[in-house]
Image (cartoon, rainbow, N blue to C red):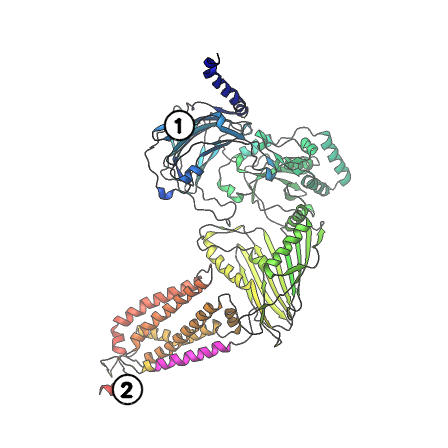
Amino acid sequence: MYRSSYPYTIPWLLMLLCLPLLLHAQRNNFTITPGPKWLAPYTPDLNKKPNLHDISSGYCLLLLEEQHHAEKKSVYQHIIRQIVSEAGVQNGAEVSVDYDPAYEQLQFHQLIIRRDGKILNKLSAGQFRILQQEKELSRFIYSGVYTAYCIIEDVRKGDQIEYAYTITGRNPIFEDKYFRTFYFAASEPILNYYKCLIASTARNIQFRSFNDAPMPVKRTWQGMNLYEWQPKHIAEPERVDYRTPSWYDNYAYVEASEYSGWEPIVNWALQVNATHDLSPALQQKIAAWQKETGDNKALYMQKAIRFVQDDIRYMGIEMGEYSHRPSQPGKILNQRFGDCKDKSLLLCTLLQANGIDASMAYVNTFAKASLRESLPSPVLFNHVIVSANLSGNHYWIDPTINYQRGTIDNLTVPDYQLALIIKKGTNALSSIDQRYNGTVRISETFVLPESNKKPAHLQVLSNYSLQFADDQRENFAENSMKDQERAFLDYYKGLYGDVRADSGLQIEDAEPEDRFEVGEYYTIHNPWKADTTAANHQQFHVQARILTDMLPRVPDDNHTQPLALKYPYSLDYTITLQMPNDWAMDNASMHVKNKYYRIDFTSAVNGRTVTLHYQYNSYQDHVPVDYLTNYVDDRNQLAEIGGFYLYWDPTAGSSTSPDGHKGISWVMLVLCLLFAGIFSYMAIRFYHRSVFPLQYNPESWAIGGWLLLLGFSITFSPLGILVDIVRSGFFSNATWEAVVHAQDAQVRLLVFIAELACNVFLCVYAILLVLLFFRKRDTFPAACIVFFAAVLSVQVLDYVAVSALNNNYAWSKDQISSITRGIIGAAIWIPYLLRSERVRKTFVVPHPSAVQRNW
């Protein structure tokens, strides 16, 4: 008996062992079934070969087929992975599918490996693990989404992994309207790509393309509308830089929506957010506030806002239809938690109960104003706030903001930009204006000693108002004072080295004015660092990092994406330095204002006190691509005034300023005179030369025609070059100090001196040309041609050298314009000097000494 029953016992044992897995999978709406019969016909070319040069993960997709059926509420996926390397075995041997078992069923149809002409079936319910990961729990959101996860065994290089599944079901909260976003991008090559949508002819589905995504081809199939995509090439989008604004999306995608406008969305939302009878506890709360506030609806409104913001904690249980349907206000009051839609509905209910006009408003915290470009659908929004009207004033209220203080007259919300107000009759998006944004005022005061025998002292006073006060209030509430003090201290240690706190942080929270102040007090040991370029000199590097960190640098290779700015933001930043002696400095300033931002900087000295004052305002949330070149110029200029070296010689009792010694750089002046002498000697030698054989014609032509214009230009060129030399700061001691104390001082010094030498050479050369021109010397044409070429070469080399020395440096419009003028001038005058008969007949006078030698 035992022997004969053995073959039948094993399968039963296996079934018993797998039964718990099968039951667990079925309980979570996971089953193994044959493929659906409603699929549209599609035949891929499986003989295509991938370009190995394009594969980065070790595998490619031989097939990506995705079919949607609007009427059956189903999405079918069919994928074939081609493993081409060992990296593909690591990266491509797992399958995972996310779904919500509250309203979706996951049906797996196929999971096989093709190897050497053989088919290995890997589809088994026991191979799958149904996981509930809740990836958004860190944001206090419980969604109920499950993941069916399978680790495929025995995968090898060269295998083809083919699998197919269907997810059936749709969140009942959306009723029967169709909307979907179809993406057309991939990180790995796709050799056969097919997407389609099958829908009833009764549905009026609109499509809109973004980022050059292909529009579908429509045809009729089996009495249905069939919308198909078969793009030949799916490109990997350019990597999005982390500095781009949240709404920037360079993925190719197509939106599909059956909604004709925003009003149907509002009508849908009014039903979803309908409030039933008020609970007794909610009625008691409303009655108590009404009794306490009397006829003062503004005070009632403030109490309701504070209660919902601070006493109802944020936690979202967004399973099934509760992804978009809020819980009833009475339930939220009792359980004392809810997500954004729960808290907004509760606040609206509280306000409406006292005769205040209040409505829920849908926003998208990432897409913001780009919502205007999208087709209407309920899933475009990811956050809910409140729109309220009281006594002729309109208010935007975010019930999820904690620790918001002040009165209702200065309520602020983040930069959401657009909202859909859920109110009967609304048929358009509304703009959310930014007002009462507040300001950040920071004052850093340094007291610097004569030497490192004594420490320096630093006092930092930070004043935050309105939304910036709310942010700081929340920051201090959610972190221990110990952690805050460590973070503030570490910031200044990173800037100034051996920094120690004199006391704990001093906090003042003025809630009625919505103002928050922080005081910091530090001692800086050994503030002065040795200046290796000058004996007895010490230096202190003061840095305005609070501002410079606010404006990010743009990489040289990323001028194709917009740059995000913190908005709204207003900073008033003052650095005051009490120096050990009376100070002198060249006043520096910067004033930039455009429609994106404003930067102002001024410096002043009063005896021993140096004051550096910075102001910054952002006017938009980004800098567009076509303005990035200007932004880079402004950011480079800000970098120059955002950090200064202060030099001090305690033995001489003298001082230097952030821009160096005031006055003339005698070193550069002497070098200038030396260069002038050398080049003048060379010019005199050249002046005595003549063109051989001599062609002296005593009846040479008079200077006329186009030569008058050329002569006018040449006559004033020495003066122009001289003015440029003076304005360029070659003789300023401030410039000299900045160069010799730079990090790469030796290279910069060589370039600086070379620039001076080139400019002096051109100045002397220009004077020589003036003499040659008016004396109609035979050497003038050749000398003038060399001059045009020399001017252009010096300009280009100068700008190239500056670019090499300064990271992220971009040529300014003036520099490009100057080079362009030089090229145009050379292109006009050089051919003229070579071919003009007037030139040949005018410049024929040799030097007298050459004539005598010839005779």
Residue 554, image x, y percentages: 48, 55
Horizontally, is 806 left or right of 218 in the view? right
Find numbered disc 2 in the image and state the secondary structure of the residue it sits on: helix
Q: Is residue 704 visible?
A: no
Give the labeled residue for mark 2: 849
Residue 311, image x, y percentages: 70, 39
Q: Which image quadrant: the C terminus?
A: bottom left
Residue 815, image x, y percentages: 42, 64
**Quick check: marks 2 and 1 in contact, CB under 8 Å?**
no
Give the labeled residue for mark 1: 120
Question: What is the span of residues highlighted in magenta in the rendered image?
Answer: 665-684
For residue 765, above or below residue 11:
below
Marks 2 and 1: which is nearer the front? Answer: 1
**594 or 754, which lies in front?**
754
Residue 838, image quadrant: bottom left
Residue drawn 41% across the image and 22% down it: 37
Residue 491, image quadrant: bottom right
Magenta stretch contains residue 670: yes
Horizontally, is 129 left or right of 525 in the view? left
Which sits earlier in the primary sequence, circle 2 or circle 1?
1
**493 or 435, which lies in front?**
493
**605 or 55, which lies in front?**
55
**172 or 448, which lies in front?**
448
Tell me the chief SS of the magenta region.
Answer: helix
For residue 72, above or below residue 635:
above
Residue drawn 33% across the image and 82% down it: 685
Q: Judge the density around disc 2: few (<14), some (14-19), many (≥20) Cα neighbours within 10 Å.
A: few
List the single residue furthest toward the top. Answer: 1
Q: Amino acid at mark 1?
A: Leu
Q: Amino acid at mark 2?
A: Ser
List the single residue furthest toward the right. Answer: 291
